[in-house]
Amino acid sequence: QLQLVESGGGLVQPGGSLRLSCAASGFSSGYYVIAWFRQAPGKEREGVSCINSSGGSITYADSVKGRFTISRDNAKHTVYLQMNSLKREETVDYYCAAVRRLSCMVGMKREDFGSWGQGTQVTVSS
């Protein structure tokens, strides 16, 4: 069974940086994409970024382009989300998710993914 565990959340000042990690285990053979979502209280879960198995398919939400970078270390079965120039309104919970497919989808939605981590909290505050 596929399991995802996020880490790296915490408190950061506006304009600061954090790197989130998503450690994956239980993969069977085949291709997977892993994505980051975030969710504020009372709002829908929003897709942030996605990366496929080879790293050749990567997508970003418009709101994070140029500030966030997704990457993966297949040897460690870990996907990272480097977040720079963080804004106060990005004080939300971040989740990683996985689904078996070859490439990332445009406009990914929560229902596109079947495996989820428990989330990690990011607080952007001075």
Image (cartoon, grey):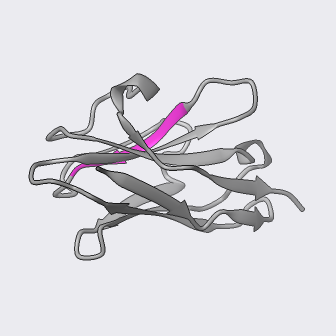
Name of the residue lying farthest toward the left: 29
Name of the residue lying farthest toward the right: 126
Tell me: residue 28, above or below residue 44.
below
Residue 126 visible in the shown view:
yes
What is the number of callouts on the image? 0
Residue 11 image-quadrant placement: bottom right
Prevailing secondary structure class for the magenta stretch in the rendered image: strand
Residue located 47% across and 37% down the image: 61
Return the residue nearer the eye: 77 or 16: 77
Task: Tell whether position 33 is magenta.
Answer: no
Residue 111 located left or right of residue 53:
right
Q: Position of residue 120 (x, y in %)?
A: 63, 55
Residues in magenta, as a range: 46-52
Tell me: residue 73, above or below residue 53.
below
Name of the residue lying farthest toward the bottom: 75
Q: Position of residue 10 (x, y in %)?
A: 72, 65
Name of the residue lying farthest toward the front: 1
Residue 95 located left or right of residue 80:
right
Q: Position of residue 100 (x, y in %)?
A: 20, 40
The C terminus appears in which quarter of the rendering? bottom right
Residue 82 visible in the shown view:
no
Residue 50 image-quadrant placement: top left
Residue 36 located left or right of residue 113:
right
Q: Position of residue 105 (x, y in %)?
A: 28, 31
Task: Tell whether position 47 is magenta.
Answer: yes
Return the residue nearer the eye: 89 or 1: 1
Tell me: residue 84, above or below residue 94.
below
Residue located 79% across and 59% down the image: 14
Residue located 73% across and 50% down the image: 87
